[in-house]
Image (cartoon, helix red, strand yellow):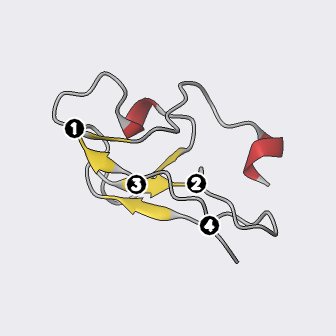
Amino acid sequence: MAVVDSQLHLAEGTVKPCVKCKWHISDPTNPARGQCTVNRTQMGSIWKRWIRDVLNMTCSKHEEGKLSFREHV
């Protein structure tokens, strides 16, 4: 199965941090961390990636807003 990688990278002071992205899911125990759900496998399943710093990490798939139920499943 091929997965298209969104290339999360550290960008200090970015205007598009993961915390504002609709693909971001907060870590319930540490709000400075989270998970990215933008990547999908060829079968359509979610491929989650850990985000070490939600305030200073970003990627090319950044989209502001909220994740809808249909996009999540």
- CA separation, marks 1 and 4? 23 Å
- CA separation, marks 2 and 4? 12 Å
Q: Considering depth in this image, is 60 or 45 the residue closer to the camera?
A: 60
Estimate the x, y position of residue 60 in percent, counting from the top left.
46, 38
Identity of the amino acid at label 3? Gly
Which mark identifies residue 37?
2
Query: What residue sits right under mark 4 in the picture?
Result: 3
Estimate the x, y position of residue 51 in percent, counting from the top left.
36, 56
Say whether disc 1 or disc 3 marks the residue closer to the N-terminus: 1
Q: Is the residue marked by circle 3 packed among few (<14), some (14-19), or many (20+) residues within 10 Å? A: many
Horizontal placement of 55 versus 20: left or right?
left
Q: Indicate which label's residue lies in the foreground, 2 or 1.
A: 1
Residues under numbered marks 1 and 4 in contact, where contact means CB atoms less than 8 Å apart: no
Q: Considering depth in this image, is 47 or 35 the residue closer to the camera?
A: 47
Q: Indicate which label's residue lies in the foreground, 1 or 3.
A: 1
- CA separation, marks 1 and 3? 16 Å
